[in-house]
Image (cartoon, rainbow, N blue to C red):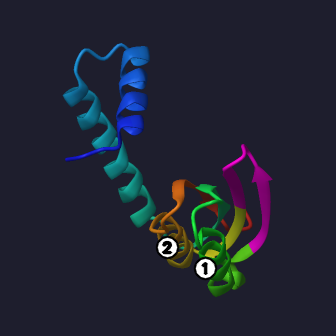
Amino acid sequence: MSLPKKLLTEFDDVLKDRGYNSRSKGIRDALKDYIVRYQWMRDMEGDRVGIVAVIYDHHYTGVMEDLTNIQHQFREYINANMHIHMTENKCLEVIVVKGDAQQIRDLTEKIMRLKGVEHVKLTTTSGGEKL
């Protein structure tokens, strides 16, 4: 496995802060967390309401256009969005979603696969009238 030096340095810093003695243990824990998050997303059912938080590098060629195109494809499930300039290069897009869990999952996974997107987090709850 190869990783960019900056990512590995940041990971090592997190491991140190958390008291890990082994990079291998940290990688195992990170992979387990990734799998649990995926399984949670996969198992969502029914109507959901929530947000998709996306951090991306707006200087990456085409990322803003790709993100907009995906949002247009899923416009029936998007209630609102907010764009925040975090730094010179980084932006945060907060997308408010409501509707079928499968469609929200598809929207989220398409965004995750975009080049230039650095982080995506989906948070949802039941979309029913009784919350």
Crowdedness near tag 1: few (<14), some (14–19) or many (≥20) residues, C-alpha within 10 Å: some
Query: Residue 121 at x, y = what percent?
Result: 55, 53
Vertically, is 53 above or below 47?
Answer: above
Mark 1 vs mark 2, CA separation in Å:
7 Å
Residue shown at the point (63%, 60%) measured from the top left:
59
Q: Is residue 17 magenta?
A: no
User: Are dots 1 and 2 in contact, CB under 8 Å?
Assistant: yes
Disc 2 target residue = 110
Vertically, is 87 above or below 123?
Answer: above
The circle on residue 70 is 1
Residue shown at the point (60%, 56%) measured from the top left:
56
Q: Which residues are magenta?
A: 79-94
Please, what is the three-letter code of the amino acid marked with disc 1? Ile
Residue shown at the point (30%, 17%) measured from the top left:
20
Question: Which of 41 and 61 lies nearest the eye of the viewer?
Answer: 61
Vertically, is 131 above or below 65?
Answer: above
Q: Earlier in the sequence, mark 1 or mark 2?
A: 1
Tag 1 secondary structure: helix
Q: Is residue 91 magenta?
A: yes
Query: Residue 85 at x, y = what percent?
Result: 77, 50
Q: Is residue 35 left or right of residue 70?
A: left
In which quadrant will I find the C terminus? bottom right
Q: Is residue 68 visible?
A: yes
Residue shown at the point (36%, 13%) measured from the top left:
19
Dominant SS of magenta comes to strand
Query: Residue 64 at x, y = what percent?
Result: 66, 70
Find residue 107 and report its image quarter. Answer: bottom right
